[in-house]
Amino acid sequence: MIVSLGTGMGLKKAIREKIVGFSGHITISQYDINNSFERAPIELDSALTQEIKSIPGVVSIQAFGTKAGILKGPEDFEGTVLKGVDKNYNATFFKESIVEGNWPTLQDSARNDSVLVSAILAKRLKLKLHDAVNMYFIQEAPRPPRIRKFYICGIYSTGLEEFDKTFLIGDLYHLKRLNNWQNNEVGGFEILLNNIDQLELITSQVRAELPYDLDAQSVKSNNEQLFHWLDLFDLNIYMILVIMIAVAVINMVSALLILIVDRTNMIGLLKALGGNNKMVISIFLYQSGAIIFRGMFWGNLIGIGICLLQQYFGIVHLDPETYYVSEAPIALNYLYILYLNAGVLVICMITLLLPALMVSKISPIKALRYE
């Protein structure tokens, strides 16, 4: 039960953090039914930005922009999206995902031609670190595509194939020039929170602060299918816990029945000496409780030990194309483990009351004759 709880919550947390790393918890953009990567620019004045930052739970707000284009390699080309960010962007997620090279150094005074390309795109287009690549941005006919030359400063891999095969990360300044935006205009803003459990509440609070032409969307609403899939993890964990508790209950009932049958003579002797049913039943319940506590001690020791081994040494590996991670992640919540232990103990003890009542049906005369 502990291993299923740790791995289930760990995998859910790891994938959720990867999704949030790409787009933040909340995205502010132009209110539009157009779901493409070509959105109208927006701007937030300093007063509104400070108002959003003052909402409890908001950690930071950062600008970004996206523009679709065609990335051309030496032999092939691929449709991609350039995501532009500035020097204030929280790049912790991407820096941790870099497998080769470095994060581009972004500045306010000058544009940077360096980009971060995913390992999937690099493999498909046969690109290497420090290669120069051309990206073509389509314009309205009859104007020809606009070409920008970029230099690959780093290669990243998050394990989320849907995102990795789509995005490359570069300087927001390029998008402003390509779209003829003003210096204070951006494609949108990403908001980072300190607790995803408050996501829907804070999203509604941010939306209430925005003018009528802007909208705030949570990462869940923008990635509904992935989050619905993650919600199934909870169902799997519940099913495993129910099955394991049922197995534990059956085992303990069997053990108690064996104890009662094995100690039938003792039951008869105690009753013959004046012991009442309540006293005799309590003896067997205490004995059953001792067995449960002994099993729980070793179960906790082995279960937490396995989780810690996986957490620090990554013994069990997974297929990243299926699970989005290369190693089985672990998330140990000791409060949940405490609740789990308490729940198992209470359920087992309550269930054992029924077979323990068999003691009251045993006659002292028949019990003393029992062999």
Image (spheres, rainbow, N blue to C red):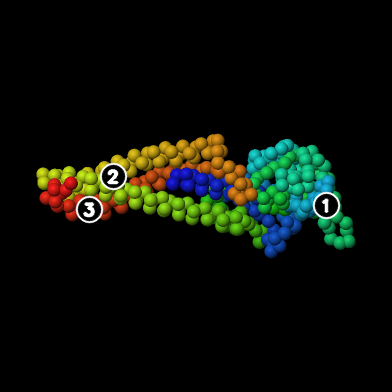
Decide: is 281 above or below 215: above
Residue 120 rendering spot, x and y as whole percentages: 72, 47
Label located before the other in sequence (2 or 1): 1
Q: Residues within 10 Å of mark 3 (few under 14, many from 20)?
A: some
- The answer to whether one can see residue 59 in this image is no
Q: Residues within 10 Å of mark 1 (few under 14, many from 20)?
A: some
- The answer to whether one can see residue 162 in this image is yes
Residue 358 rendering spot, x and y as whole percentages: 22, 53
| Disc number placed over residue 288 in the picture, else none | 2
Going by the image, does 260 lie left or right of 17?
Answer: left
Q: Is mark 2 in CB contact (under 8 Å) with mark 1? A: no
Q: Look at mark 3 in the image and give the residue it sits on.
A: 357
The kind of secondary structure element at disc 2 is helix
Residue 112 rendering spot, x and y as whole percentages: 79, 41
Q: Residues within 10 Å of mark 2 (few under 14, many from 20)?
A: many
Label located before the other in sequence (3 or 1): 1
Report the amino acid beneath label 2: Ser
- Please name the residue shown 67% across and 58% down the image: 214
Report the amino acid beneath label 3: Leu
| Disc number placed over residue 136 in the picture, else none | 1
